[in-house]
Amino acid sequence: MSERLEHVWNAIDPLRLRQTLMDMIDIYSPSGKEEDIQLYLEERLAAVGTPLRRQIVEDERYNLITTMGQGEPSLYLVGHVDTVAAWDIDEYAAIEEWGVVRGLGSADMKGGCAAMVETWLALATLPEEQRPSVGLLLVVGEEENGDGSTKFLTEQCPDWAIIGEPTSLRPAFSHYGYMEVALVTQGRRIHSSLPELGHNAIESMLRVLLQIERSPLFSQQPSKLVYSIREMSSSRAGFVVPDRCDTWIDLHLSPDIQPETVRTELEKALTHARKTIKGLSLEASFDFESGGYELELSNPLMEALEDVFPRLNLPLEFVPFRSHSDGNLFYQAGSKPLILGPGSLETAHTSEEQTTLAEVEAAARIYASLALAYTQTDQQN
């Protein structure tokens, strides 16, 4: 272990890190309402004296950007401070038991953000001439439309980004693509005791969804194309046959499947549905699509990963990141994103969301190792 890394690891304070994590979870910060948590983090980061600025996204919403070292960093630690809305506004706060921390955003991704902030505080204890050229970016809006990262990427695009989404500390150099499809069926409202005189929009929607599911598109391995009906709602007007049904579909695509291919096949399935389902009135829109990516494992961060994981007694296992994240935006802009963070994706967005203090501390040590190793490699090149 180099003297610099040993110094930084010794400067990582588990008690301070725990406090940061618990404080962050206790600050409610759903997308669009991130100001309180950014004010908290701004105060934390301002104390170390590295250049710190707000990047306005809209109104009272802003990213936080801080840098150290010489020149414009080509590596950024990136975390999003927003969460989905609370499942229970009275029970979103942090609870710790036997080293397990539960609460809204504990995995997605306040655990990763807290680890990155602690990494930053530890790196800042190095003499200025020994500090790596690295940036820390804390963005808003990831859970909605990625407007925080989009704003950052209009101004600069680092060569590498380490994004602390929950991967159970398994590095993800590959990332699934994502598509969002909205469907609307229209019917004819009638009293529910006389359904034969109306047209049930829900029944029409169910028939459409069955045809989509039977499409050849889904005959391949399930892990290649993940299909999820996220939400369905209908008109609520009392004791009647519903005359409208709205459905939102999520599709997660392995890196080798292109969104345009999926869209073409879905359009074929929808065309067939319009021809074969009696009385169908169907509208479809492809509201969002982003391709995945797969980075070469021969890259400047690999040597550091191969060194630090045995030191932490962690298995070095590579996984694809199956959800959508700002990693897609960074890749499209020309950056190379590594997704790596504490907590598991399985519990994210649920009432069982959790991470562990051990994983969050390990993440801080990994981020420090990557920052120092990459900067040294970058300077040699």
Image (spheres, rainbow, N blue to C red):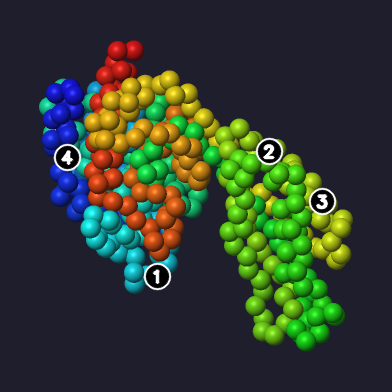
Q: CA distance from mark 2 to mark 1?
A: 38 Å
Visible in this render: residue 72?
no
Residue under the image location 18 percent in, 28 percent down: 5
**Kind of residue indicated by mark 3:** Thr
Residue under the image location 28 percent in, 57 percent down: 101
* Badge 2 or badge 4: first in the primary sequence: 4
Q: Position of residue 179 (x, y in %)?
A: 61, 46
Visible in this render: residue 370?
yes
Q: CA distance from mark 3 to mark 2?
A: 16 Å
Q: Which residue is mark 3?
A: 271
Q: CA distance from mark 2 to mark 4?
A: 46 Å
* Badge 3 or badge 4: first in the primary sequence: 4
Q: Quadrant of the C terminus?
A: top left
Q: Which residue is mark 4?
A: 12
> Residue 124 occupies which quadrant of the picture?
top left
Q: Which residue is mark 1?
A: 88
Q: CA distance from mark 3 to mark 4?
A: 58 Å
**Kind of residue indicated by mark 2:** Glu
* Badge 1 or badge 4: first in the primary sequence: 4
Q: Which residue is mark 2?
A: 260
